[in-house]
Amino acid sequence: MKKVWFVTGASRGMGAEIANAVLQARHCIVATARRKESIANLPRNENLLCLDLDVTDEEQACSAARHAVDHFGRIDVLVNNSMRWRRTPHGHRRTRPGSE
């Protein structure tokens, strides 16, 4: 059965690898990034929906989820792969979305 995946941070790294694997397996995917243009490396087809999503923006997150359900009818799998970096006295440090 074809699953519908919702992947945050799909523009590079592990998120991009997951997105490619989902498409190769012929599942549907909602691939998100802060700027959907940064997801241009994914092969375009009817199983792919690219959306802008800053996971720290609750209104944008709700809108993206609604758009995904409107487009594919449901979400079966969520991969919350988004991270953000913040500068610390010792360099950059990865933090969870929304953490300060």
Image (tube, rainbow, N blue to C red):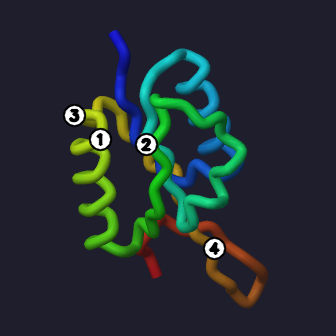
- Please state if 75 lies on the left or on the right of 89 as rendered: left
Front: mark 2 or 4: 2
Frontmost residue, 55 versus 97: 55
The residue positioned farthest toward the top in the image shown: 1
Q: CA distance from mark 3 to mark 4?
A: 33 Å
Amino acid at the residue labelled 2: Val
Q: CA distance from mark 2 to mark 3?
A: 12 Å
Check disc 2 and report the residue beneath it: 30
Please tell me which residue is depicted at 36% across the width and 22% down the height of the picture: 3
Q: CA distance from mark 2 to mark 1?
A: 9 Å
Please tell me which residue is depicted at 45% across the width and 43% down the height of the picture: 49
Check disc 3 and report the residue beneath it: 73
Amino acid at the residue labelled 4: Trp
- Please state if 16 lies on the left or on the right of 46 as rendered: right
Secondary structure at badge 3 equals loop
Q: CA distance from mark 4 to mark 1?
A: 31 Å
Marks 2 & 1, CB-CB < 8 Å contact? yes
The residue positioned farthest toward the bottom in the image shown: 89
Marks 2 & 3, CB-CB < 8 Å contact? no
Check disc 1 and report the residue beneath it: 71
The residue positioned farthest toward the right in the image shown: 91
Quadrant of residue 78 in the image? Answer: top left
In the displayed structure, would residue 67 be above or below residue 88? above
Amino acid at the residue labelled 3: Gly
Secondary structure at badge 4 equals strand
Q: Position of residue 81 (x, y in %)?
A: 52, 50
Check disc 4 and report the residue beneath it: 85
Q: Specify which label sits upstream in the sequence, 3 or 4.
A: 3
Marks 2 & 4, CB-CB < 8 Å contact? no
Marks 3 & 1, CB-CB < 8 Å contact? yes
